[in-house]
Amino acid sequence: MDADPIVALTSSEFWEAFKYLNRDFFRKVEILNEFLGKVSGIVWGPYLLLPLLVLTGIYLTARLKLIQIFKLGFSLKMALGKHGHQSHGAGDVTHFQSLMTALAATIGTGNIVGVASAVSIGGPGALVWMWLIAFLGMATKYAEGLLAVKYRVKDAKGEMAGGPMYYIENGLGKNWKWLAVTFAVFGAIAAFGIGNMVQANSVAGNVVFLINPAETFSEEQVALAKWVTGILLAILTGLVVLGGIKSIARTTSVLVPFMAVFYMLGCLIILVMFAGDIPAAFGLIFSDAFTGTSATGGFVGAGVMMAIRMGVARGVFSNESGLGSAPIAAAAAKTNEPAEQASVSMTGTFLDSIVVCTLTGLTLVVTGVWTEGGDAAAHMTQHAFEKGLPGQWGGIIVGIGVVTFAYSTLLGWAYYGEKCIEYLFGLGPIFVYRIAWVLAVIVGARMKIEIVWNLADVLNGLMALPNLVALIGLSGVVVSETKLYFDKQKQLK
């Protein structure tokens, strides 16, 4: 009897076949990457999305009378206090669970790899522009959350369905349904970039770095390790995603607080150890925001425009204000007050960008690793923690942080993507979408980081455009609902 051809395949023959497939895969990927890079430059250039995001944030901040300052304390109490864990009306999850689902999607690799990428390419000054877009984004996120609850609907399963596609169609009117469809199409596809492949890629890269710190693996061994990591991550994702929003909310409500506190403690320990360098770090950050950064060490140098672009792009990637993703989770909250959930939603941007991203950025600057350059961005935060903490604790903390952050993002964005599919096609294709989502994790784990980031940037931008149009068009509704709610709160006191 002839031997089984798979069993008969020798080790050398296996590696030769693997090398060939690996090289052929990346030849095709490089062509696509070059195209995506050009498109990303246009979408995130100075004449399209950057000014639109900023102007929308300024407009909403003015119309809401600096709500991100005067109502922040109230919002944090609503989100994290006793009120956030209770049911206050129709919906699928509590305020806290809704926030944790949204944060699961936002507190991800954008807080580690994204911040490192912004600082390494745009210089320390990129942090200032990240803070600015986060401040303005809090008003934007508030408006998104309010409209999500006001215009949500019940689907055939009795669950809440909401987000930009619903407040565009039901708020702006049927004549704007084409814009709602546009958002849903971009959202369903964008989920595979920002919420899936970027996260899987970061997990795979950090896992390889952790098991191979001396970089002794051959190119083929690294590739194989990434494929295996992708498969394992896909299985873990499928175990939760296939259960829907309640399964996702239960998991993220435990995972997100743990991972955020664990990671922030590591950052704080490093900042205490480098406390004497913090004033100089802030000086460097603010000066470089308006003057650009000269080449130093492994850093290539960046102009002011690059600092602005990287700060805004990575800031939006991290907190997702204006993208229209978070309101999809906000619509599931158990409440009858749109402004109540809006207040809770606003805290997501504060916690993500003002707190977590700031800690990451300061850690990179005080330890000096930001000069390593763009090519090392994927491991830059890991190097900062290794430099700032004794022994191997630094690498372990970041490794766990990346894996848990990315895993939670995979869960949150899976829900966003399937809700876009539901709007377009109904409940029928949801199971197929979930299976496709799990399989995409494996592909993302092996893709090169450049194409993953370029794809995410392009899709983020295309997703944001219809949402920002709706936010401006429905700003009057946001203002009137806000006034009505807080006038009611005054009467209750």
Image: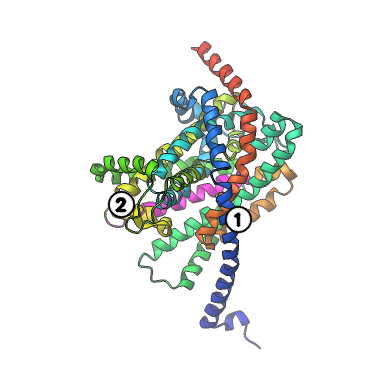
| Residue found at the very far right of the displayed protein | 175
Quadrant into which the N terminus falls: bottom right
What residue is shown at x 55% (from left), y 25% (from top)?
340
Most frequent secondary structure within the magenta stretch: helix
Splitting the image into 4 quarters, where does residue 2 fall?
A: bottom right
Which residue matches tag 1?
Answer: 438
Which residue matches tag 2?
Answer: 368
In-image side of 185 versus 131 (left or right): right
In the image, which is nearer the foreground, mark 1 or mark 2? 2
Quick one: 185 or 202, which is closer to the camera? 185
In-image side of 134 versus 31 (left or right): left
Residue type at mark 1? Val
Residue type at mark 2? Gly
Element marked by disc 1? helix
Q: Is 394 inside the magenta-drawn segment?
A: yes
Element marked by disc 2? loop
Residue 239 seen from this side: no
Q: Is the residue 6 above or below the residue 453 in the image? A: below
- Please report the bounds of the magenta region as a residue range: 391-417
